[in-house]
Image (tube, rainbow, N blue to C red):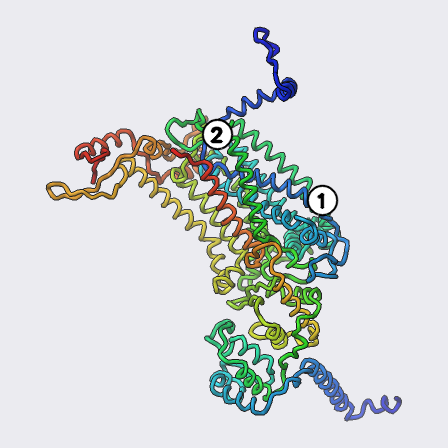
């Protein structure tokens, strides 16, 4: 590149390292890329770092997982244990379980790496979930980021698939029970279910093929897809640039923050080691998935406290909440010789289906209702989008009810309540919990907006009560500085948009529905204080302004 | 044979057949139950034990179980429950019961060893039942691996694979087994206290019970090889831990990393 401009003196490196670097740079153009990326600006906020946590967890998973593949043998052939864990000596088991035990007890560092791998997996999905919640509640999924939101959703599903296939590999009793439930769910799918199950397991459950197949999915296909999605995801982050919280000088046309290099890059690199350190500490001090407790898989025993890892928990919970029969109403039918088992099919697939459908389509739903087709790079504070926040909390509550149901037995034993009562309460909350959550959240958001407005107009309460000469008591309010002020007034508060006729002059029923939803979405609103209102409020304050020792304070009632 | 077949229409043939059937069934039942009570009389109680036990029983237990332990509408008859049942229920403090509930709760025991033995002697004197197990079955020197298999097949569905306990319906529960003495574990299997089924000697042999006790004591002594066990409750406590502790610590770091000194 530098050779093309003849006026410049060609750069001649002096040191050996310099010569090598220059040689490489002339061929790959690394300095240009570095210059471009090094100047990329990222806004600073702690809630922007969960995606990073997920990425780093994934890197940890790749590294620890590679170590585990050196010693894991995904065979379901029968063997007898002869390792150093005596309570299983000579017990008949699969080679897969045997090698998992050997990793745990007879390979140096094996147990540590197994625990690093599993804790990192739990953290991976958890940070992914929190990242998505942050994106949702701040409205970061809006144009132009809708497709990246979908990529994120695909990543969540892939992470769950990756987690579940990994959970099943040790072929211990716990994971075998989990696999048995999956088998039951697959078989409940009408007509094709039994065929899918037979193809997946290579015959009747459990067969001798499933561990090997899950292993291939776990170490090859799913991680490759996750990696691809991560690349697409990060590429789009670079294209769209990062969103930012509202603040003075921040708008949809800029990004206010720090350049990537050198400080930010150092921070991000250091953060990787922090995440690794936290995972390593957890792995060193807290046991996870103690497969030796569960014993080898055998279809007959089922242990109490059999649960999947947390991210599959909501499906397990939904299964637990589903009644077998309601009074005399059965959920199982035989249609043309095919058994239709609704009490497995409904809870296993419907809630998860609803959650993911709404998750994937939400950016378009909101876009349609609000008719908002502008680009948004400045985020919403959750309180400033009360209906969206309420929808999010309602969905999260619904998820949490099912999540809690997966641990219903432990709730019962640890809080000394009856298991049946836990189930009845959670069944009730399954239906009314999201509704209550929606109403409460919306009211809380609106109340917070009112508080913001109050503070913007009258300043912060100082807690100082002053008695005026004529006997009146007033509380001293301190005005905010401009930065805080901006945060409280610098947001949009759209009002409902009425139904509009299309090009033929007809107001379609669909448009009427949209207008009704728009009313529902924006009807309850607290508008930010306008400049005129602020002027009036501050002018009013000046009347009674008193000079205190160090700072200027305005008074109001 | 011919004589027998000729008499098959004799008026008394049906009665003879019925008698034979009853004898065979009764005989088999007697054999089967003695299998379970084979050790019913190995522990010898003195007559004074039973006498003292009777007094203790009348003062502390008869309110619910009735005089002579014949049972009332509030509590079952104790005739034939055996010394093992008394030793378990009284020895773990479950009896006398603190209050009515889904099941008797463990609590500090009300009677000392001698009083417990006297009560056991009294109840054992009312009718044969499972006896307090012989010390040779409680030496914890059985086959832990075999015990583990028996435990997973017979016990883990309520008590959890790591013996951490689990929930049953309507407030009933299977307790955690850490810290329970081998004798009480054996007696629980033999008598089926609260909501537990009876695992008699035909179901799990005395040697099998010894293996199970060995297994439980081995995993208790082994501790948790992988670090703190988080209650041995499986993925729920692990998930709770990663969300609260793991993510909590990481959020603290993110706040630290993005904070400015200004």
Q: Which residue is mark 2?
A: A42
Q: Residue B128: percent from the left, percent from the top?
A: 63, 86
Question: Quarter holding the C terminus of chain B?
Answer: top left
Nearer the observer, A28 or A512: A28
Q: Residue B211: percent from the left, percent from the top?
A: 68, 69
> Does residue B232 appear left or right of residue A457 in this picture?
right
**2 or 1: mark nearer the eye:** 1
User: Which residue is rendered at x = 56% and y = 50% of the image?
Assistant: A310
Question: Quarter holding the N terminus of chain B?
Answer: bottom right
Quarter of the image where one finds residue B76 = bottom right
Task: Tell me which numbered mark, 2 or 1, is placed earlier along the sequence.
Answer: 2
Nearer the observer, B115 or A17: A17
- The chain to which mark 1 is attached is A
Point out which mark residue A70 bears: 1
Counting other residues with Cα less than 10 Å from the Cα at mark 1, is it few (<14), some (14-19), or many (20 or more)?
few
Q: Say which element carries label 1.
A: loop
- The chain to which mark 2 is attached is A
Q: CA distance from mark 2 to mark 1?
A: 39 Å
Q: Residue A345: percent from the left, percent from the top?
A: 60, 52
> Does residue B153 appear left or right of residue A533 in this picture?
right
Q: Say which element carries label 2.
A: strand
């Amino acid at each position: 590149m530098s050779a093309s401009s003849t006026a410049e003196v060609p750069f001649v490196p002096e040191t050996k390292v310099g010569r090598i670097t220059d040689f490489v740079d002339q061929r790959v153009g690394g300095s240009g890329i570095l210059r471009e990326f090094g100047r990329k600006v990222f806004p600073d906020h702690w809630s922007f770092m969960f995606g990073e946590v997920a990425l780093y967890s994934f890197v940890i998973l790749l590294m620890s997982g590679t170590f585990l593949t050196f010693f894991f043998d995904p065979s379901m052939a029968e063997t007898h244990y002869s390792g150093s864990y005596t309570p299983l000596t000579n017990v008949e088991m699969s080679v897969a379980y045997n090698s998992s035990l050997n990793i745990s007890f007879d390979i140096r560092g094996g147990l540590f790496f197994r625990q690093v791998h599993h804790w990192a997996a739990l953290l991976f999905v958890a940070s992914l979930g929190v990242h998505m919640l942050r994106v949702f509640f701040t409205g970061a999924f809006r144009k132009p980021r809708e497709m990246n939101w979908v990529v994120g959703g695909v990543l969540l599903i892939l992470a769950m698939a990756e987690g579940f296939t990994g959970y099943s590999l040790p072929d211990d009793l716990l994971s075998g029970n989990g696999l048995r439930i999956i088998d039951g769910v697959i078989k409940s799918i009408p007509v094709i279910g039994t065929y899918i199950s037979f193809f997946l397991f290579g015959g009747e459950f459990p067969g001798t093929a499933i561990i090997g197949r899950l292993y291939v999915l776990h170490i090859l296909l799913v991680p490759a897809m996750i990696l691809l999605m991560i690349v697409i995801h990060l590429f789009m982050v670079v294209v769209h640039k990062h969103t930012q919280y509202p603040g003075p000088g921040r708008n949809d046309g800029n990004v206010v923050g720090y350049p990537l290099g050198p400080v930010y890059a150092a921070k991000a690199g250091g953060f990787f080691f922090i995440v690794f350190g936290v995972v390593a500490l957890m792995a060193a001090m807290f046991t996870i998935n103690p497969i030796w407790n569960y014993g080898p898989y055998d279809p007959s025993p089922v242990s109490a406290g059999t649960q999947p890892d947390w991210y599959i928990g909501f499906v397990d919970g939904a299964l637990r909440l589903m009644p077998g029969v309601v009074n005399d109403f059965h959920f199982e039918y035989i249609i043309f010789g095919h058994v239709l088992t609704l009490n497995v099919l409904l809870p296993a697939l419907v809630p998860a289906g609803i959650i993911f459908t709404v998750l994937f389509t939400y950016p378009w739903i909101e876009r349609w209702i609000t008719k908002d087709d502008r680009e948004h790079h400045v985020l919403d504070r959750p309180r400033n989008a009360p209906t969206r926040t309420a929808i999010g909390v309602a969905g999260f509550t619904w998820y949490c009810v099912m999540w809690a149901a997966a641990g219903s037995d432990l709730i019962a034993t640890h809080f000394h309540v009856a298991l049946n009562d836990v189930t009845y309460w959670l069944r009730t909350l399954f239906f009314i919990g999201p509704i209550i959550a929606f109403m409460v959240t919306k009211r809380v958001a609106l109340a917070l907006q009112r508080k913001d407005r109050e503070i913007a107009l009258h300043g912060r309460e100082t807690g100082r009560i002053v008695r005026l000469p004529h006997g009146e008591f007033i509380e001293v309010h301190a005005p905010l500085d401009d930065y805080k002020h901006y945060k409280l007034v610098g947001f949009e508060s759209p009002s409902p948009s009425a139904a509009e006729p299309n090009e033929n002059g007809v107001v379609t029923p669909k448009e009427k529905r949209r207008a009704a939803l728009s009313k529902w979405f924006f009807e309850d609103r607290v508008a930010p204080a306008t400049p005129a209102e602020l002027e009036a409020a501050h002018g009013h304050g000046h009347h009674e302004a008193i000079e205190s020792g160090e700072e200027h304070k305005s008074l109001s009632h | 044979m011919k004589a027998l077949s000729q008499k098959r229409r004799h008026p008394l043939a049906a009665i003879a057949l019925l008698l034979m059937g009853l004898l065979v069934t009764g005989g088999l039942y007697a054999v089967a139950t003695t299998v379970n009570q084979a050790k019913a009389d190995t522990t010898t109680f003195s007559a004074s034990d039973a006498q003292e036990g009777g007094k203790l029983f009348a003062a502390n237990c008869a309110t619910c179980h009735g005089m002579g332990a014949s049972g009332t509408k509030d509590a079952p008859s104790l005739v034939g429950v055996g010394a093992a049942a008394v030793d378990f229920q009284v020895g773990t403090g479950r009896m006398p019961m603190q209050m009515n509930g889904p099941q008797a709760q463990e609590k500090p025991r009300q009677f000392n060893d001698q009083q417990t033995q006297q009560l056991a002697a009294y109840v054992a004197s009312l009718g044969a039942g499972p006896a307090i197990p012989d010390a040779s079955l409680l030496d914890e020197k059985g086959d832990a691996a075999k015990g583990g298999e028996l435990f997973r097949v017979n016990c883990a569905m309520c008590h959890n694979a790591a013996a951490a306990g689990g929930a049953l319906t309507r407030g009933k529960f299977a307790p955690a087994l850490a810290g329970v003495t081998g004798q009480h574990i054996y007696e629980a299997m033999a008598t089926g206290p609260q909501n537990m089924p009876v695992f008699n000697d035909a179901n799990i042999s005395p040697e099998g019970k010894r293996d199970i006790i060995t297994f439980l004591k081995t995993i208790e002594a082994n501790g948790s090889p992988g670090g703190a066990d988080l209650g041995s409750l499986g993925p729920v406590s692990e998930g709770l831990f990663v969300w609260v502790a793991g993510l909590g610590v990481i959020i603290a770091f993110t706040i630290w990393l993005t904070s400015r000194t200004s």
